[in-house]
Amino acid sequence: VLLASTVARAEDVLPSWREGPARDAIIAFVGAVTKEGADSYVPPVERVATFDNDGTLWSEQPVYFQLLFALDRIRALAPQHPEWKDTEPFKSAISGDMEGLKAGGMDGLMKIVAASHTGVTADEFAAAARTWLGASRHPQTGKPYTEMVYQPMLELLDYLRANEFSVFIVSGGGIDFLRVFAEEVYGVAPEQVVGSTLEAHFELRDGIPVIVRDAKVSLIDDKAGKPVGIYRHIGRRPIFAAGNSDGDLQMLQYTTIPRSSADTRPRFGLIVRHTDAEREYAYDRQSAIGKLDQALDEAPRRGWLVVDMKKDWRTVYPGA
Amino acid sequence: VLLASTVARAEDVLPSWREGPARDAIIAFVGAVTKEGADSYVPPVERVATFDNDGTLWSEQPVYFQLLFALDRIRALAPQHPEWKDTEPFKSAISGDMEGLKAGGMDGLMKIVAASHTGVTADEFAAAARTWLGASRHPQTGKPYTEMVYQPMLELLDYLRANEFSVFIVSGGGIDFLRVFAEEVYGVAPEQVVGSTLEAHFELRDGIPVIVRDAKVSLIDDKAGKPVGIYRHIGRRPIFAAGNSDGDLQMLQYTTIPRSSADTRPRFGLIVRHTDAEREYAYDRQSAIGKLDQALDEAPRRGWLVVDMKKDWRTVYPGA
Ligand SMILES: [Ca+2]
Ligand SMILES: [Ca+2]
């Protein structure tokens, strides 16, 4: 696979990307860091690439898909928690008030996640997420959520791996939710998933070892939490990072800003901009979900590639 | 390398292990999980092996080597912290009272680590650890610490990797200290190191992105913390775990105890028992460092291999 990809003609690479400056920039970067003997060469072990998930690898409208999963569980648990009727974000969750939920931001999301996903073992949680992903359909497209991934980004993951990059997901979403489908859908192994994390503890339950999920947040892997998640899990600074919102600003900074004037290593920042109301969604500076404002302003100065979904992508979803 | 190892004659494998039941058990397990078509076969992606570090991959007497590094830093910082003179564990640290330090256990160690390693960036810390490891010598052997690794265990790491295992370190020691030498000494990449972890935060310092280490513990990756560390970082249950003390008890349980009567997957637990006062150290049930008591009692019932350093290992340190 490695050899075949390396010698593939340029036109065979990233086929769902339209020819143009975005595709050219990616190919030029990969060419530079893999060119042995060049000043720009980066050894394979240091070719770390990190990808945000929601809005970067799959859709995130009308709200984060994990939130829809959490809401289904909250509604099922509500009869046991009468106090939720008058407390946000549960009140909005039970009534299906998406605007109320959006107003709570990532903190609100984490409260929903903590309340709906704790007291269960890791295995029970994974089984519930797997069942939900298999059975549920997106309210607008009718597709399974795992088919609302971006074909051009799947090709980019493969292209980087074919060039000996280690590809990680670094997401504000829950690490254990992501791990349920990341390997099958993205080819990203559980140990290469970084995400928001709950505290947990180990116990022998009737003699069987289990991990139990606790109602306390260990890491919110969003904004300034992303470089911390990368540092903890990966322990190396990436040379490539891709995101779609201000939640990725610090990851993009951490990845791309040189550490000194002597630091001339090539680095790549990529922002997926949602410009395609017809094939997907169009939103940026004003959106409660996936707000892209500060990072968009900073992109030209940092040299980050802003991908225009409508112009740069031949297709959006696989098989479309 | 893979092919060559697979077809190697049995006698070429693990050459620093004496022939006998310990070496035979390891080889039989690896043969079973790699035998395609057999009930015992485990796909490569699920061949996760986790190794404790202190006392399992390198020596830990008279005290954990990372503690010696921390003590050197505490002494240098002591003039700025007059209150340390009357507060444990700092009092013992400054006076070099090893017994006092041992009495403080892992909690005391973490206090020392937090106090001596915070307020610096991740890069500054790594540089300090690298310098110390290069310059320091063990008080009894006079060797660099990175040469006090166990040759038979290095061979075991290589043997497992040659058989498509993913090898992780899961240590009570600090993750960032380990990462400084794990790749060079053990061939274990930073992202495959799990260890005790401090909180940290991201900032732009004079425009340069840095991770700053905070004086708060995020995870003590010891005892019941080890399965939690494995769950967070790896997201898969290991099929092979190696340790040397009661700090590894829960990791061994998590790795080897079947989840149900239908769970017949082969699993391997290994305990390095320090029986060699001449070539290394002899200690177990009574030791403040590396106490091996409950796990030793549980080993026969769980089927864990207890490796007798004196009997089972031809050599202890490389080049000896
Ligand atoms: Ca996003
Ligand atoms: Ca140990």
Image (spheres, coloured by chain):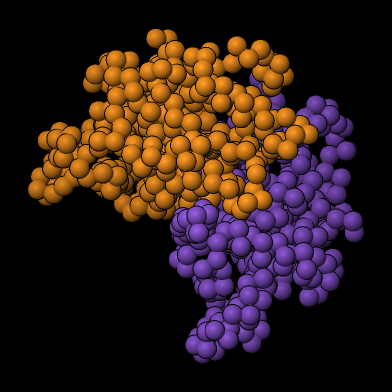
Chain colours: A purple, B orange
Q: Quadrant of the N terminus of chain B?
A: top right
* Residue A260, x across and y down, in percent: 47, 37
Residue shown at the point (50%, 59%) measured from the top left? A206
Nearer-the-camera pick, B251 or A195: B251
State the residue in front, B37 or B166: B37
A80, above or below B73, in the image: below
Residue B293 relative to residue B272: left or right: left
Judge whether residue A237 can be spotted in this image: no
A215 or A155: nearer the viewer: A215
Image spot of residue B110 (x, y percent): 30, 46
Q: Quadrant of residue B41?
A: top right
Counting the numbered discs, the total is 0
**Residue B294 visible from this viewpoint:** yes
Residue B136 on image: x %, y %: 29, 22
Q: Is residue B201 left or right of residue B61?
A: right
Most distant residue in the top direction: B320
Q: Residue at x 46, y 37 (%)?
A: B300
Picture quarter with the C terminus of chain B: top left
Q: Residue at x 50, y 28 (%)?
A: B183
- Compared with residue A97, is residue A57 higher up or lower down, i.e. above or below? above
What residue lies at 83% left-to-right and 58% top-to-bottom? A316
Please state the horizontal and vertical placement of residue A234, each as a whole percent of the image.
54, 42
The image quadrant of residue B277 is: top left
- Above or below for B200 versus A289: above
Quick check: B227 left or right of B66?
right
